[in-house]
Amino acid sequence: MESTIMKKERKGLVLFSEYKRGEGIRKALEVGRENILFELKSSKLKGRGGAGFPTATKWMLTAAAISEEKFLVCNADEGEPGTFKDRVLLMEYPELVFDGMVIGGYTIGAKEGIVYLRGEYEYMLKSLEDYLEQMRKDNLLGNKILGKKDFNFDIKIRLGAGAYVCGEETALIESLEGCRGESRNRPPYPVNTGYNNRPTSVNNVETLASVPHIVLKGGDWYMKVGTDKSSGSKLFSVSGDCNKPGVYEMPWGTSIRELLKVVEAENTKAVQVGGASGICIPESQFDRKLGYEDAATGGSIMIFNKNRDMLHILKNFMEFFVEESCGQCTPCRIGNVKLLEGVEMMEKGEFTFDYIEKLKDLGSTMQVASKCGLGQSSPNSFITILDNFKDEILNKRGNGAA
Amino acid sequence: MKKDKTSRTPVSQQPFEVEKPTDTNTIGGTVSIEINGEKMHVPLGTTILEACKEKKVHIPTLCHHEDLCVAGVCRVCVVEVEGFKTLQAACAFPITSPIKIKTSTPLVRKARRYVIDLLLSEHYGECYSCIRNQNCELQDLAHEYGVDGYTFGHVSKPTYEKDTSSYSVIRDMSKCILCKRCVRTCIDLQEVGVLEAIDRGDKTHISTFMEKPLADVICINCGQCINRCPTAALHANDPSDEIWEAIDNPKKHVVIQTAPSPRAAIGECFGLEAGHSMTMELNTALKRIGFDGVFDTNFTADLTIFEEGTELIIRLKKALVDKDASVKLPQFTSCSPGWVKYIEHFYPEYLDNLSTAKSPQQMFGAIFKTFYAQQKGIDPKDIVSVAVMPCSAKKFECNRPEMNSSGYKDVDYGLTTRELAKMIKEAGIFLPEMPKSHFDSPFGDASGAGLIFGATGGVMEAALRSVIEFVTGNKTEDIFANANILPLRGFEGVKYVELPIANVGPVPEILKHLVPSWDFLKGATLKVAVAHGTANAKKIMEDIKAGGKFSECHFIEFMACPGGCIGGGGQPIPTTPEIRKKRAEAIYGEDSSLEMRKSHENPHVIKIYEDFFKEGPCGHLSHKLLHTHYTKRGKFIA
Ligand SMILES: Cc1cc2nc3c(=O)[nH]c(=O)nc-3n(C[C@H](O)[C@H](O)[C@H](O)COP(=O)(O)O)c2cc1C
Ligand code: SF4
Ligand code: SF4
Ligand code: SF4
Ligand code: SF4
């Protein structure tokens, strides 16, 4: 198989800025744990997997947990519809991701790193393995990395089995342990009780890829980009109705309107920020800014132009959740079915406004009562699409039906 | 969190082990919390549910069960915890820091109501035609939350085909609410692992390996899953219609035997607190229903002690005197059909250790269709024999093809405690009001030794009461006050007792032809063990495999169900450690109130050896009628 790791000439502010393999690790081993954590903390780096938990805190908690064995897991499940930025990082910038893992392993005191790779990315496996082998040869993995005594760390890659929920960190751990992909109860949290009951830090590919830059160039450098609450840059996977779909690095705080311009989208009716589990933003709100404090996203941006049927889009999302719920808890397993049924009723024009309101209320209950992030976020699109496109969906079809 | 190496329970379903306190507010291992504004201190790691229970704040639950590890999946127990954006499952939240909990806010009530509404929307069935009507946790919840309509619709057709393949357990997945109690029961409590959630999303359902019928997989029929199912999705295979038909048929002579555990528990089906034995009231009720003979399974429990005890003595003599290396020790008890099927599947290489003695139920069945038929002058084909058992596996056992050595099926129907209670109600009888009456002759009342078979350790205690007296010639009371062998009692998973035999007495008449003298036992130490629940049985079996201390035992009692038969899969629902304890107390209480408390003192048993099994225990006829053989099943599923 021909190598899938390729160097595209991407240029960017932060992630896509200059980096030479191993430099971050070297610096990290030089300055030591405390300084790494200090820089991370001052960078205000937050998790890029969606939840936005401060990475420094997660690593501090894992580092502080007392255990002979700890694990660092790289979450490369990338299952959110419309996201493909982790794939780009792994294929084009493996040095960032893997150096980030080594630094993470060193910081939290893990000897083993595990990449949980989305099943559909199996084609990358060989090149990634080759890449790791080269790192071993160059003493960037294995025993006494770069001569540092007492620092042994290696990385293995495990393939996922193709369930969306397995991107959720505790379901991912269950899956790694050979169980059904179902999320766990929290507390306890993975930082205490993770893989094999050991303290485990699960980090998104992009989060890890940011770390070598921060260690090398400092937290302040990182903070210069983005907003106060959302520091640094973000990779956006842009798809849908635009001329230039693809992966873009942009500072946090970029407005949707700005982004649409860059990707050359015209005649846009709505932008789905954050994938199927994200929120749907209508034209009137295009000045909203991408960032944890406003329109948060793990990276997925889907653009819909004025020819699109919003109800149809919503139906696709709901069908996705009905299938992808792990089926464990009641609100998500059955709730999503009810929301989908509601969409079907609206399609046929056979509904009452009261019932649709009831379903929205059910959705907001699912957001707080579901066991994991999947069921907590699956009603987002239902609620925002119905709120923002009420005229199109309800009034048009509802005529006479109510 | 603990993860037992042998357990296959997913970590998410195992109980929490709480981290050491790191917070200064958690001094002395307790945390101060607030529930609905009221302050209290709880030990670190207490769940919100437990804390609320202590404060008498009722939190509804469905997937939670005292016997099982936490799941946190039904979401009906959600509460508000200050500082959390989402609601938290009270059953799954171990308290490790000072928190403020609110249990009845509008948001909480709405969430619970929606969860119930959602469950009902997919739940096929109408309560009035349901086996769990009036004893169903889903129904209770709907009632508690004032459900008066189907907010999100209601399925009008069954969603799954019923699985009626098993003699013991019927699966009606259209009534399943996916609480996974059965999964946790089977894999965690019993460590059998028949059931698991299959598929995901809206297709999620509980099923078996490759979705095979239950009869074709490694189910041991213990019915523990039934006892913990909150709805009617799992229930026993009920033969009461056939039994009514037999009773109503004047040509049929219908006899019934009752085991001790149903008698200690059936009162619960009539609203009594657990722990009231209803033996004599039940006798009257059964006669009024129309059974032609009402007998005590303890009679054949006493007989079992003779047969199984003799078998043990023969094995010991062969091993110790004849130095016969082919003899298998320890001898395992064989009266729990769930255990028998478990060992057939999981440890088929140890089947030779299993006593060949049939269970008391089956022995009685064989006697009804032979000795009893002769005595009464009835054609055995006209006898219908029914056994009231605490057990669902007994239904499978009586249908084993080998259980017809008389030429007729030993036992025609195995009836559970729950099913019998239903029949009694149907006959218009309120059991607690029945006058007392005795068992019918010719078998009469049995010993207390047979009675305690119902609780874990009871078979071993019954056996030792006789073995001690047979071998040493002394009274059991000389060693154990009131002949209560306390080290064998209680609910510890595995019990182990050593009994040194300092001196031996004369060999009793009934055994003389088998062993001329006890000298070979002089100075020996008898080692016995007891396990209840197949998870505990597995511990012993693995130890034996590894050549550990249990491989040195002489005799081991195994019961498939937690607590022994009193916790059987046919017993009244619900079951909890507390309820099982009370049932056991009822049994031990009844035993100590009896005059005759040792199997070998039962005059009816001695008489049947004189009149019928003339060659004595383990003789030819008893081998034909009272002993059986087993099947190496293995774990391979065709
Ligand atoms: C249903 C669901 C799917 C998820 N899928 C992913 C995923 O594919 N990749 C990912 O990095 N995080 C995913 N997450 C978030 C993870 O649970 C977790 O928060 C993240 O991996 C932590 O890494 P971070 O702190 O670097 O963001 C998912 C969460 C949920 C609830
Ligand atoms: S919210 Fe959905 S995915 Fe998460 S545990 Fe519940 S059923 Fe599973
Ligand atoms: S299982 Fe419970 S709720 Fe369902 S029909 Fe039966 S009694 Fe009613
Ligand atoms: S009867 Fe016992 S073995 Fe069979 S499924 Fe139920 S719990 Fe498992
Ligand atoms: S069969 Fe019963 S115990 Fe098992 S998941 Fe369904 S409702 Fe729960």
Image (cartoon, coloured by chain):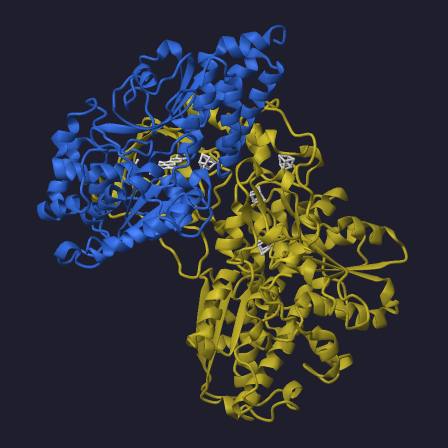
User: Of residues A100 and A58, which is closer to you in this image?
Assistant: A100
Q: In which quadrant of this rendering is ligand 3 seen?
A: top right
Quadrant in the rendering for residue B334: bottom right
The answer to whether one can see residue B588 in this image is yes
Q: Residue at x 54, y 58 (%)?
A: B192
Q: Is residue B255 above or below residue A188?
A: below
Residue positioned most to the left: A31
User: Of residues B33 and A111, which is closer to you in this image?
Assistant: A111
Q: In this view, does B394 lie above or below B131?
A: below
The quadrant the C terminus of chain B occupies is bottom right
Q: In this view, does B355 lie above or below B278?
A: below
Which chain is in blue here?
A: A
The answer to whether one can see residue A189 in this image is no
The image position of residue B257, as x and y in percent, is: 72, 61
Position of residue A196 in the picture relative to residue A61 (left or right): right
Position of residue B248 in the picture relative to residue B534 (left or right): right
Position of residue A218 in the picture relative to residue B93 (left or right): left
The image position of residue A196, as x and y in percent, is: 34, 53
User: Of residues B344 and A247, which is closer to you in this image?
Assistant: A247
User: Of residues B630 and B142, which is closer to you in this image?
Assistant: B630
Q: In this view, does B31 lie above or below B487?
A: above
Quadrant in the rendering for residue B84: top left
Quadrant in the rendering for residue B229: top right
Residue positioned most to the right: B251
Identify the colour of chain B in the image: yellow
The image position of residue B516, as x and y in percent, is: 60, 93
Number of marks drawn: 0
The image position of residue A341, as x and y in percent, is: 58, 24
